[in-house]
Image (tube, helix red, strand yellow):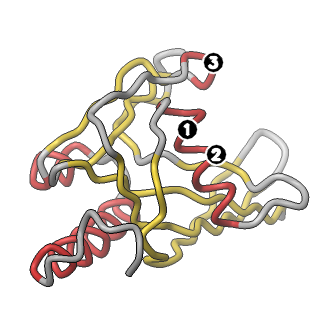
């Protein structure tokens, strides 16, 4: 079994959530949150910010850590056990540009209920719920949009 670690973000701008649409040779299709593998010597927060930027073109800032998901999947030669560390992030524009090299063919910001139903994986839906709940709490306290929490 191979152990893998990734980090990603639930990016919010004006109440809408950033999603990416992946289409890998018509075998893997679906809407996902941006995430990717931790590189040698990289902190989890650095990975999350880098992956959001690489996969979507979005400059985001981290608001807070929201949780970890774990899952396994099979490759041709082995089984991969993956942990993903998630962060609530804020963007300051609706701009996004999907990374074609990673087979992302669309991206955009969606209302919470739209994003929830579009997301392909239950664990990403769970992180969306956590992040959006935090977002609403920060908005209620009039703290959303400030750089310090």
In the rendered view, does 21 fall on the left or right side of 17?
right
Q: Which residue is mark 3?
A: 101
Instruction: Give the SS element for disc 3.
Output: helix
Instruction: Give the SS element for disc 2.
Output: helix
Q: Which residue is mark 2?
A: 50
The mark lying in front, picked from 1 and 3, is 1
Tally the numbered discs: 3
* The C terminus, quarter of image: bottom left
Q: In x, y percent, where is residue 16?
A: 18, 48
Q: Which residue is mark 1?
A: 53
Most foreground residue, 17 or 6: 17
Pointer 3 local density, CA inside 10 Å: few below 14, some 14–19, many at least 20: few
Pointer 1 local density, CA inside 10 Å: few below 14, some 14–19, many at least 20: some
In the rendered view, does 22 fall on the left or right side of 109?
right
Query: How far apart, in angstroms, are the residues tagged by discs 1 and 2?
Result: 5 Å
Quadrant in which residue 144 is drawn? bottom left
Indicate which disc, 2 or 3, sits on the residue closer to the N terminus: 2
Please tell me whether residue 80 is drawn above or below residue 100 in the rendered image: below
> Which residue is at 57% across, 69% downward?
85
Instruction: Give the SS element for disc 1.
Output: helix
Do tag 1 and tag 2 residues touch (Cβ < 8 Å)? Answer: yes
In the rendered view, does 101 fall on the left or right side of 76?
left
Do tag 2 and tag 3 residues touch (Cβ < 8 Å)? Answer: no
Q: In x, y percent, where is residue 86?
A: 50, 67
Q: In x, y percent, where is residue 93?
A: 29, 37
The mark lying in front, picked from 2 and 3, is 2
């Amino acid at each position: 079994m191979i152990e893998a670690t990734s980090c990603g973000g639930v990016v919010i701008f004006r109440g809408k959530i950033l999603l990416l649409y992946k289409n890998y040779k018509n075998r893997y299709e679906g809407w996902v949150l941006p995430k990717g593998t931790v590189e040698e010597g990289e902190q989890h927060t650095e990975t999350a910010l880098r992956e959001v930027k690489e996969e979507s073109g979005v400059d985001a800032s981290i608001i807070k850590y929201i949780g970890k998901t774990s899952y396994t999947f099979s490759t041709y030669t082995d089984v991969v056990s993956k942990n993903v560390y998630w962060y609530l992030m804020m963007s300051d524009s609706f701009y996004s540009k999907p990374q074609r090299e990673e087979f992302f063919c669309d991206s955009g910001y969606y209302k919470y209920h739209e994003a929830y139903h579009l997301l392909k994986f239950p664990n990403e839906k769970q992180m969306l719920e956590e992040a959006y709940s935090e977002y609403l709490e920060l908005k209620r306290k009039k703290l959303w949009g400030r750089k310090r929490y």
